[in-house]
Amino acid sequence: MFRRNKTYSINRKAANQALQNVFAACDQTPNTQSLDMLLFKNIANTTLVKAGKWMSVGLLVLVLLSPTVFYIAGKEGSAKPHKADITVVSHYLDKDNESFVMELKGKDIDYEGIYAKKEDGSVIYPSETDPDGTVKFHFTSGTLNIYIPDTEGGIVQAVLSK
């Protein structure tokens, strides 16, 4: 009812002798390599191919699963959106002291982390900060990008140009 492939087994000495008889019957030169060496080369070649196949299958699975990492990270990152509650209530140029003064309102403002960048990329820090919300930068002309961080990791950016 069910067919099974018949498996033949022969010892290596008899197999080598059968191979030599086939060569002799076909008027071919006899094999110079032993059957053991031929079997070893065959096993080595197929082992390398099998290992390469399984490595490529594993890498393909990793490539196909890689978008799930971004999907999971996106779900975890969007669980708590951050909204900065920092506003600039008023601002003005103090020409006498050559400074820009702004008054901030909001909760959890990190006054020690406030800084600005000039057009050339140099960083400047406020000349004065008061916990009541007043921040002063030395400013004469050009453009300043002012960064106001809060304690939760959010940053509000203000741009000043003259």
Image: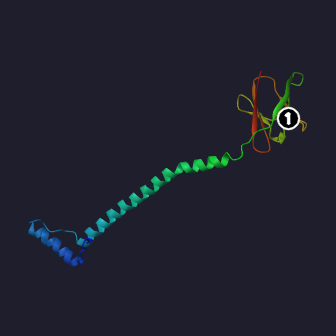
Amino acid at pointer 1: Lys
Q: Quadrant of the N terminus?
A: bottom left
Image point (75%, 38%), residue name: 155
Q: Quadrant of residue 128?
A: top right
Residue 51 at least partly seen: yes
Q: Quadrant of residue 39?
A: bottom left
Image point (15%, 72%), residue name: 20
Q: Which residue extends farthest front?
A: 1
x then y, percent, for residue 12: 24, 76
x then y, percent, for residue 130: 90, 37
Q: Which residue is mark 1?
A: 105
Residue placed most toward the observer, 143 or 70: 70
Q: Is residue 145 above or below residue 150?
A: above
Residue placed most toward the observer, 123 or 59: 59
Q: Is residue 67 above or below residue 23?
A: above
Q: Quadrant of residue 156?
A: top right
Other residues around mark 1 within 10 Å, as few (<14) / some (14–19) / many (≥20): some
Q: State left or right for residue 137 relative to residue 6.
A: right
Q: Is residue 59 above or below residue 119?
A: below
x then y, percent, for residue 37: 27, 70
The colouring scheme, among rainbow, by chain, secondary structure or one colour, is rainbow
x then y, percent, for residue 43: 32, 67
Residue placed most toward the observer, 19 or 127: 19
Q: Secondary structure at mark 1?
A: strand
Image point (81%, 23%), residue name: 140
Image point (36%, 64%), residue name: 47
Residue 100 at least partly seen: no
Q: State left or right for residue 115 relative to residue 79.
A: right
**How many numbered dots are placed on residues in this image?**
1
